[in-house]
Amino acid sequence: MPMLEIEGLSVTFGHSTGQVRAVREVDLQISRGAIHGLIGESGCGKTMTGMSLLGLLPEGARIGAKRFRFDGMELRDVAASLRGRRIALISQDPAAALNPVLSIGRQMDDVLRSHRSAPRHERRAEAVELLAATGLPDPERVLKSYPHQLSGGMQQRVVIAQALATGAEFLIADEPTTALDVTVGAQVLALLKRLVAERGLTVLMITHDMDVVAEVCDRATVLYAGLTVEEGPTEAVLASPRHPYTQALLAALPDGARKGQRLAAIEGRIPPPQDEIKGCAFAPRCPKVMPVCATVSPPDRQVGQRRWLCHLEEGTIG
Amino acid sequence: MKALFNRLGPAGSLSLAIILLFVFVAMFAPLVSPYPGQGAGSPNIAAKFRAPSADFWLGADHLGRDMLSRVIFGARVSLTTGFLIVALSLLIGLPVGLAAGYFGGWVGEILMRVTDIFLAFPALLLAVLLAAALGAGMLNCIIAVAVTWWPWYARMARAEVLVLRGQPYVEAARLMGVSHARIIVRHILPGAVRPLGVQAALDVGPALLTASALSFLGLGILPPTADWGQMVNAGRGFFPDRWWYSTAPGLAIFIVALAFSVLGDALRDKSEGRSHADA
Amino acid sequence: MAEPLLEVRDLVVRYRKRGLFAAPLPPAVNGASFTLPRGQTLGIVGESGSGKSSLLRAILRLVPAESGTIRLNAKDWLSLSGAALQEARRDIGVVAQNPFLSLSPRLTIAEIIAEPLVAQAVARGSEIRERAANLLGQCGLPADFLDRKAKELSGGQAQRVAIARALALGPKLLILDEPTSALDVSVQAQILNLLDDLKRSLGLSMLFVTHNLKVVAHISDSLLVMRRGNVIEGGSTDEVMAAPKEAYTRELMGAHPSPVGAEPSA
């Protein structure tokens, strides 16, 4: 049984007349011990999807889903109670996730204390151990530090250590390296990868960065306009994308090898969340658009480990 | 209209209505007061100390003048004084704060030290001393209060400017060769005006209150001009037997000062809510 | 060979120490030298603290240089001051990272693009609006954007406006500070294509500063890699990308994390 099973997730705001669909129809299946990439550009609903798993949607949001389960439990009922226990968040900005006026030691202890009733010296030993596990040198000193005394990479490691302190087995990492330098971000990714292997964690990696996906993710889901458009093993999705949007996204990436050539920009824009979509959401921008795309929802194609939504037959793609 | 009500909330809307009512009454004082002549100061000894009645709704003072008319004419003077104090303070404080914040360095340092010196004195005491030195009268009263008032605007303007000066669009303007004067007028001032405007609106009440205090002490507006503070003082000698004499102008001060304070709070909540939504 | 448009020699930038007895700060830029030939693009790559921003700010005369020389368009750029400096600023157009911060939120697009034209008194009256519309068109936006405000635009559209403004005074050098870092991948491609078109059609020279080596390698003729205030590697883009001399450059290129267990401390 997959750890996370989501089918047809929608997140909407407002009245039936002026409905805003932040998430239209997202499918997501993550098995235990996997790092699963959730890829998309701004406005595709990837962060909202993550927040819905944490029960942290803004007021007035309505969740709809055919299936919305975590470890066999109905997430709509338990999301809030799992947050900070079995599911933890690692956000983009570690500085905002840490309280600037409390020492790291105090903040680690607050988390540990709320999860088990161990004596103070044991909790301290555990905090040291967790910080060391995230690759922080001299954890004793880090415990005495305040967030501003640490670099961005160190702060992100502390946030990860806090997530471990909750005992969470499922981490939602929302652009965890975007605010960090390239080399530091690479270290944080390596750390996550190692923790997954050592501790059997499961990670939902929300990102816009294909390099991050290629680096750490076992499987990847591509979102467009609040819809899952493609899903499959990372290498397969990146090497031979099936959905024209995934293809366009990869082609738009600059690559030193094709220096000086024009990049394949995707013209047009994502349909705004208040628009109702007829047919395929990507049709207005799709270079391979056919008449049928404008009126009929694309079929759900499944071949082996891969899934995508497109009117094109497999042989005619790519 | 409804949108305005929604934004200010019931208390804020009521306060705005009260203020507008006072402003309206003050503007058309000769038309709306029952005895315009008495309001302007002519005595009517026959009605001396008449208690509140159908003829004299708020009673009459020691010269027999209708208190309601006096309070209405007093609104002209008191409101004008309040507005002018705030306006004059802005006129001094805003340029000082803008210059100190924008140019910084030793110019800013000197300007802010001077500002701090003014702030170091207890405001009311300084105003009383100044008013005593300058002599009584409406203009001197306004000057005396404004001198204690502007440093607040200077500090506030400087704080706003320091934030705005660091904005990338201000730096971009500098890099394109836009002159300092143009940057201040076009980019800095519009950003600083809203928070300062809210503060200024909020301050009309307290300014009026301070001016009334000076008048009460005999250092502000002189009889026969009707001013609320001076009227409270005049009625003091006849309290509590002729209680209406001091009570009527006192209540007017209380209501107007309270209305400005509540309206200011409503405005502040609104602009704070706005800046959160921007973030 | 013609004189290069920009020539930087041994530039040192050091920020003032805080407090009388504080130790002097290490230089933010420690002796940078490079030349930018006309019509070419130089990419400057580095992470936070590398000194790339300080280098830019010194070239823009926003911070003083401690020593070294900068020649721009056959002028001793660091010796200019006052009105001469303001006028010479016409030669440089600047595009910052986040267009929503670098475009005034209170002005319309027309007013934003008109600002440099008015400041340098190169156009007046109805001519200004016409020029602004032309500049927008050059950057791929229709003239009906003139009456909008920046917040009504998408990130890509706003960055196009920022580029249009940077081009208003007919600069010879375009300085781009992380111009696509705040944008989505598909929009980034549009902006990079636009910059490439402008470079060709206007014969612009560009300084392109970013932390993203792939982006800069795509658009630059030559590269400069900076780390902790030092230029650690430089050369033609093809050379550097094919055979980086420094391990750090390779790290930036691949962003391949070190092997598990051997992560260097952050």
Image (cartoon, coloured by chain):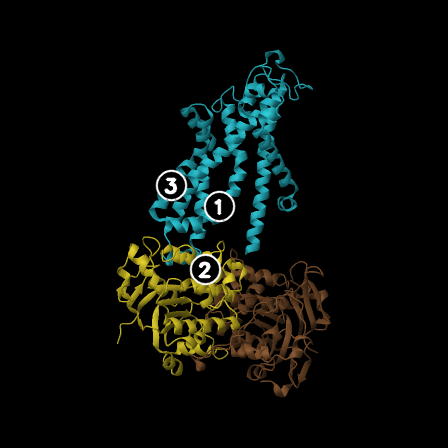
Chain colours: A brown, B cyan, C yellow
User: Residue C64, how many percent across, how many down?
Assistant: 31, 59
Secondary structure found at label 2: helix
Secondary structure found at label 3: helix
Residue A124 position (above or below residue C239): above
Mark 2: give few (<14), some (14-19) or many (20+) Cα within 10 Å.
Answer: many
Q: Please identify the quarter of the rendering in which residue A92 is found.
A: bottom right
Disc 1/disc 3 C-alpha distance (Å): 23 Å
Disc 3/disc 2 C-alpha distance (Å): 33 Å
User: Residue B159, how many percent across, how many down?
Assistant: 45, 47
Q: Is residue A145 visible?
A: no
Chain letter for the residue marked with disc 3 in the picture? B
**Residue type indicated by callout 2:** Ser
* In the image, farthest residue toward the front: C126
Give the numbered dot on residue B193.
1
Q: Mark 3 points at which residue?
A: B113
> Do the CB atoms of the residues marked 1 and 2 lie less than 8 Å apart?
no
Q: Which of marks 1 and 3 is nearer the N terminus?
A: 3
User: Between A233 and B179, which is closer to the camera in this rendering?
Assistant: B179
**Residue type indicated by callout 3:** Arg
User: Residue C240, how many percent across, how many down?
Assistant: 37, 80
